[in-house]
Image: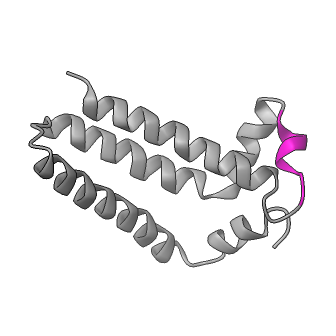
Amino acid sequence: MTGTAHLRRSTASPPCCRNAYGATIGQAQAAVLYAGSRMRSLRLKPGRVAGALALSTTTHWWADRSIHLKALADATGKGRFYALGGPLGGAYALDRAFHHAVETGAALIVASK
């Protein structure tokens, strides 16, 4: 795959499948967070967990619509970087960076007192 082909492919599926993918991500994160917190005897606040999972799931869905990240890249002056080719090009790198930043924010929400 070159350029944004991986992103175009992910948005080529019907909306029901894209929504199911986002829901699956949220369910997997909830299961791992629950299991990890039980193993470590952590008392997480349900409201914070729900907020973090909502942030993660909705932004994951939003970012996987390639048009949104492209618009964000253009607005921040990174449009040329986004357009770099190759299987690990700019679109892929910005997608990964966005997801990592949001997951860090979600983790901070869960960990806050």
**Residue 67 or 31: which is nearer the viewer?**
31
Residue 51: image x %, image y %? Answer: 28, 39
Instruction: Give the percent coordinates (x, y) of residue 4.
Output: 79, 63
**Residue sitting at 87 percent across and 63 percent down?**
86
Left of 97 or right of it: where is 17?
left
In the rendering, at what x and y percent does residue 19 appear? 44, 67
Which residue, as the protein is rendered here, is positioned at the far front? Answer: 40
Decide if residue 31 is on the left or right side of residue 94.
left
Q: Is residue 99 above or below residue 77?
A: below
- Colour basis: one colour
User: Which of the 4 quarters of the picture holds residue 106?
Assistant: top left
Residue 41, percent from left and from top: 9, 43
On screen, residue 55 above or below 39: above
- Residue drawn at x 26%, y 30% is 111
Residue 22: which quarter of the image? bottom left
Pick the residue in front: 62 or 93: 93
Residue at point 14%, 44% (across, down): 40
Q: Nearer the viewer, residue 9 or 32?
A: 32
Magenta stretch containing residue 83, yes or no? yes
Q: In the figure, is residue 67 to the left or right of 102?
A: right
Residue at point 26%, 24% (across, down): 112
Q: Quadrant of the N terminus?
A: bottom right
Point out the stretch of residues depicted in magenta: 78-85
Q: Is residue 96 magenta?
A: no
Given residues 54 and 109, the one toward you in this image is 109
Which of the image's four quarters has the C terminus?
A: top left
Q: Which residue lies most toward the top here?
A: 113
